[in-house]
C-alpha cells in the first residue's frame, strides 16, 4: 500500500489482528506485491468503521435466511447451518474473484456448479436432520419433493450468485488494470525524475569541470614553458582526476573510496595551482570505503565549498572531508571549510538542488542533507545516512 496500514495503529483489537495477519501479508507480497495491497485494502475496509455496513448486511442475510427456513418447518440448528454455509461460501467466492480477477471464466463456472451441488446436498442434509429430529425417516420421494421445492429458490439464487460473481470479477479486473496503470505511471515519473537529475548533474559538471580543467592546463603549460619541475606532478594528478571523473559518470552508484580518490586528485591540483593557499585533508573511517553514493556527489560538495567559500576568501583556506559511523549504524559524510561562510539569503544552487534530488531518488528517507554555518567560521555540508 502507498500509505501505512491504519490497522497497525488502530485500537487494541485492530492492532492484534494486524500482528496476526502480517505474516500472511508478507507471504502474499512475495507472490505478488499488488495482491498484498488488495488484501490489505479489504482488511482495512472490513475491520474499520467503514465495514460495519457490510457486516450488518451479511448478518441480516444470515439471520433472515435462518428465520425463513425455520418458519417453513425446519429445525433451528439446520435453519442456521444452511444459511451459514451459503453465506460463507458466497463470501469466499466473492473474495476469490476480487483478489484474483485474472482467473479464467471456466473456473468461475466450475465454482458455480460446485456451489449448486453443495447447496443441494446441504438441503438434503438439513431436511434429513430436521425430519430425524421429529422421529421420521426420509424416503426417496420426500427427498425429491424437497429438492423440487427448493429448486424454485436455488435456481434464482444461483443465477443471482452467478451474475454477482461475474460483476465482481469485472470490477476486480478494472481495479487491477487501474492499479497497474497507477504503478506504471509512478515508475515512469520516477524514471523521468531520475533521468532529469542525472542530466542536471552532467550539465553542472559540464559547466564546472571544463573551467577547472582549462585553468589547470593553462598553469601546466606555463610550468612546462618555464621547465618548472612542478609540471610533472601536476600532470599526473590531472590525469588521475580526469580518469576517475570519467569512470564515475558511467555508474549508477559508486563506492565512497572511488569518490574520495577523485577528491584527493582535485585537492592536489587545486593546492598546486593556488601555490598552497588552499589546503585540503581527507579522513574516512575504516569500513566506510564500500558505502555507495550517487557518482560525483562528494566531488560536487567539494567543488561547491571551493567555489563559494575558499576561492573568494582573502588569504589561506582549509577544507576537510571526513566520514564516520555512529554506534547506531548511521554514517555521515562532512565537507567543512573555513571560507566566507553562508550568505544571509543563501539558497541552493543547481548543484545542491540536484544533490538533494539525487539523494532522495537513491535512498528515499534514509538520506538527509544539511548545509549550515560553522561556529568557528565557514560552512559545513553534511550527508546523514540511516542504516
Image: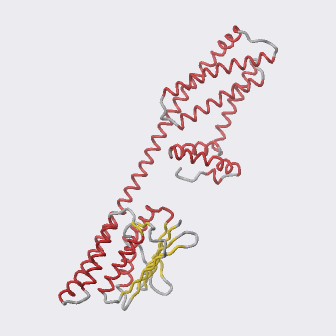
Q: Is residue 325 visible?
A: yes
Q: Residue at x 65, y 29 (%)?
A: 87
Q: Residue at x 55, y 73 (%)?
A: 326
- Find the residue positioned furthest to the bottom: 315
Expressed as whole percent of the image width and height from the top left, the position of residue 242 reads 28, 73
Task: Name which quarter of the figure residue 135 lies in.
Answer: top right
- Find the residue positioned furthest to the right: 135
Q: Is residue 78 above or below residue 271?
A: above
Task: Name which quarter of the figure residue 379 lies in.
Answer: bottom left
Task: Name which quarter of the figure residue 155 lies in.
Answer: top right
69 vs 385, left or right, is right
Expressed as whole percent of the image width and height from the top left, the position of residue 224 reads 19, 86
Q: Nearer the viewer, residue 318 or 348?
A: 318
Expressed as whole percent of the image width and height from the top left, the position of residue 153 reads 64, 18
Q: Nearer the viewer, residue 121 or 55?
A: 121
Q: Is residue 344 visible?
A: no
358 vs 10, left or right, is left
351 vs 163, left or right, is left
Amino acid at each position: 500500500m502507498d500509505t501505512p496500514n491504519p490497522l497497525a495503529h488502530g485500537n487494541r483489537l485492530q492492532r492484534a489482528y494486524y500482528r496476526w495477519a502480517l505474516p500472511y501479508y508478507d507471504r502474499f507480497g512475495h507472490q505478488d506485491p499488488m495482491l498484498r495491497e488488495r488484501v490489505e485494502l479489504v482488511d482495512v475496509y472490513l475491520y474499520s468503521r467503514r465495514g460495519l455496513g457490510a457486516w450488518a448486511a451479511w448478518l441480516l442475510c444470515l439471520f433472515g435466511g435462518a428465520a425463513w427456513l425455520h418458519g417453513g418447518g425446519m429445525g433451528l440448528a439446520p435453519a442456521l447451518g444452511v444459511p451459514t454455509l451459503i453465506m460463507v461460501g458466497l463470501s469466499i467466492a466473492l473474495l476469490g474473484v476480487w483478489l484474483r480477477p485474472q482467473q479464467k471464466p471456466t473456473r468461475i463456472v466450475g465454482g458455480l456448479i460446485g456451489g449448486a451441488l453443495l447447496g443441494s446436498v446441504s438441503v438434503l442434509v438439513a431436511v434429513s436432520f430436521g425430519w430425524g429430529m421429529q422421529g421420521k425417516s426420509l424416503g426417496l420421494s420426500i427427498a425429491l419433493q424437497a429438492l423440487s421445492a427448493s429448486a424454485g429458490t436455488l435456481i434464482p439464487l444461483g443465477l443471482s450468485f452467478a451474475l454477482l460473481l461475474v460483476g465482481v470479477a469485472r470490477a476486480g479486473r478494472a481495479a487491477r488494470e487501474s492499479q497497474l496503470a497507477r504503478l506504471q505511471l509512478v515508475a515512469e515519473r520516477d524514471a523521468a525524475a531520475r533521468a532529469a537529475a542525472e542530466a542536471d548533474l552532467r550539465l553542472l559538471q559540464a559547466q564546472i569541470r571544463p573551467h577547472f580543467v582549462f585553468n589547470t592546463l593553462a598553469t601546466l603549460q606555463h610550468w612546462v614553458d618555464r621547465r618548472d619541475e612542478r609540471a610533472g606532478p601536476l600532470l599526473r594528478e590531472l590525469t588521475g582526476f580526469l580518469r576517475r571523473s570519467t569512470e564515475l559518470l558511467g555508474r549508477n552508484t559508486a563506492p565512497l573510496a572511488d569518490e574520495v580518490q577523485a577528491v584527493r586528485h582535485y585537492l592536489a591540483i587545486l593546492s598546486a595551482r593556488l601555490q598552497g593557499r588552499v589546503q585540503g585533508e581527507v579522513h574516512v573511517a575504516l569500513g566506510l570505503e564500500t558505502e555507495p553514493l550517487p557518482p560525483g556527489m562528494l566531488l560536487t560538495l567539494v567543488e561547491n565549498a571551493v567555489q563559494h567559500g575558499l576561492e573568494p576568501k582573502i588569504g589561506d583556506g582549509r577544507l576537510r572531508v571526513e566520514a564516520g559511523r555512529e554506534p547506531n549504524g548511521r554514517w555521515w559524510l562532512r565537507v567543512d571549510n573555513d571560507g566566507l561562510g553562508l550568505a544571509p539569503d543563501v539558497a541552493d544552487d543547481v548543484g545542491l538542488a540536484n544533490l538533494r534530488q539525487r539523494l532522495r531518488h537513491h535512498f528515499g528517507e534514509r538520506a538527509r542533507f544539511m548545509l549550515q554555518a560553522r561556529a568557528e567560521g565557514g560552512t559545513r555540508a553534511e550527508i546523514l545516512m540511516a542504516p
